[in-house]
Amino acid sequence: MSSDPWGRVDETGTVYVRTAEGEQVVGSWQAGTPEEALAYFERKYEGLVVEIGLLERRVRTTDLSAKDAQTAIDHLRTQVDEHHAVGDLGALRVRLDKLVATVDSRREERKAQKAKQTDEARAAKDELVAEAEQLAQSDQWRSAGERLRALVDIWKGLPRLDRKSDDELWHRFSHARSAFSKRRKAHFASLDAQREDARKAKEKLVAEAEALSKSTDWGPTAARYRELMADWKAAGRAQRESEDDLWNRFRGAQDVFFAARGEVFAERDAEQTENLKVKEELADEAEKLVPITDLKAARAAFRSLNERWEAVGHVPRDARPKVEGRMHAVERAIQEAEEGEWRRTNPEARARAAGLTGQLQAAVDKLRQQIDAARAAGNNAKADKLARELEGRQALLDQALKGLEEFGG
């Protein structure tokens, strides 16, 4: 019979292993010596030690699932419990029990981690849904659309929740996207309709602008072009491809008209500049007639100058007031000279002036007497009132005396 600390072989070739519960039969060995039998089953024990060590390392260093780890543990435990090896089987059971505890701990950790990830995913999806529902009301079609597409990518990268919760959140998320797409589609459909209306309106404006481009009715046509431009701005924008073409035609028609008007105005301006020089020379000659010494000669000379003046065409608008003002000043001087001559040579007018002066002088003398009488009677209020009336009559008298002097006294 042969033995070691963990097993023995009896005389019949039966191999035993020692355990805490007593000896257990390992198997029967008939092929060789007892030592060879013990060595064989000890090697089987070492094989179990190696397998358990490998499993411990896998559990410790890899993401082996708890289910797979437990299956491997149960397989090894079955081999240990079947006593087909010689060695410290109890130690192997202890290691397997510790491994079970480790796997259970890892399972709880992963469960807690998964629960945390689920909570985080739920919170993240809640935020995505809230943002999507807010974006669904936005009118910033481009930026909101891009953001909603980005939210879809973020959603796809998040872990799934339980089916009911995930479906409910996805339904809200998808509904928000659909609502935005529906609103955007309606907006652009309306915009397309508006742009088509704008295109039709601008077609009419272009047609009129092109019809006016050959007009030589400069003022009214230029005014109409300003109205057409205002109508153009009020019409809104057409589709881009139509807008550019219509604008080029509209602007081209205006350019034709205003270029033609510019040429005509340039010729007119040159002519009016020459006319201004002529009228300034005539004004110079007219101003030499002042002061008036010979009314008859001055009147004849001015009439001749004025006829020449009327024969000259238009002058630049900004220069017109000044040059015409010079001629009007000479004309007023002649008129004033004529009025003075008339007053001096008109006896009826002189008589009327003398009569008026006499009446005013009598009124002034009477008022002075009344004032003196009032003051003598102590009625100062009446005297003051009469004095104020006297001031007005005296001013009229002074004016009448001045007019009388113009008649030669």
Image (tube, rainbow, N blue to C red):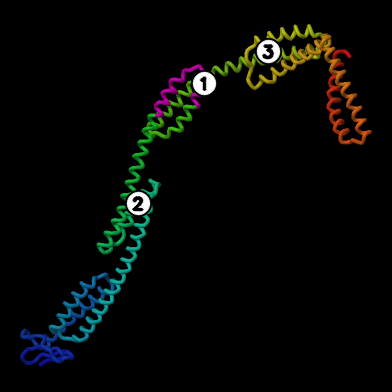
Amino acid type at mark 3: Val
Indicate whether 78 appears above or below 170: below
Magenta-span inclusion, residue 208 = yes
Between circles 3 and 1, the one closer to the viewer is 1
Is residue 188 in view?
Answer: yes
Q: Residue furthest right?
A: 376
Q: Position of residue 333 (x, y in %)?
A: 77, 15
Tell me: 294 left or right of 138.
Answer: right
Total tally of numbered discs in the picture = 3
Q: Position of residue 2 (x, y in %)?
A: 12, 91
- Tell me the tag on residue 148: 2
Q: Earlier in the sequence, mark 3 or mark 1?
A: 1
Q: Which residue is mark 3?
A: 278
> How far is the residue under mark 2 from the one under mark 1?
55 Å
Q: Position of residue 271 (x, y in %)?
A: 61, 14
Q: Residue at 22% x, 81% y: name it.
A: 96
**Secondary structure beneath disc 1?**
helix
Give the quadrant of residue 105. bottom left
User: Which residues fall within the magenta stretch?
Assistant: 201-226
Amino acid type at mark 1: Pro
Q: Quadrant of the N terminus?
A: bottom left
Q: Position of residue 224 (x, y in %)?
A: 49, 24
Circle 3 packing at 10 Å, graded few (<14), some (14-19), many (20+), is: some
Q: Residue furthest front?
A: 377
Q: Nearer the viewer, residue 54 or 291?
A: 291
**Secondary structure beneath disc 2?**
helix
Q: Residue at 35% x, 51% y: name it.
A: 148
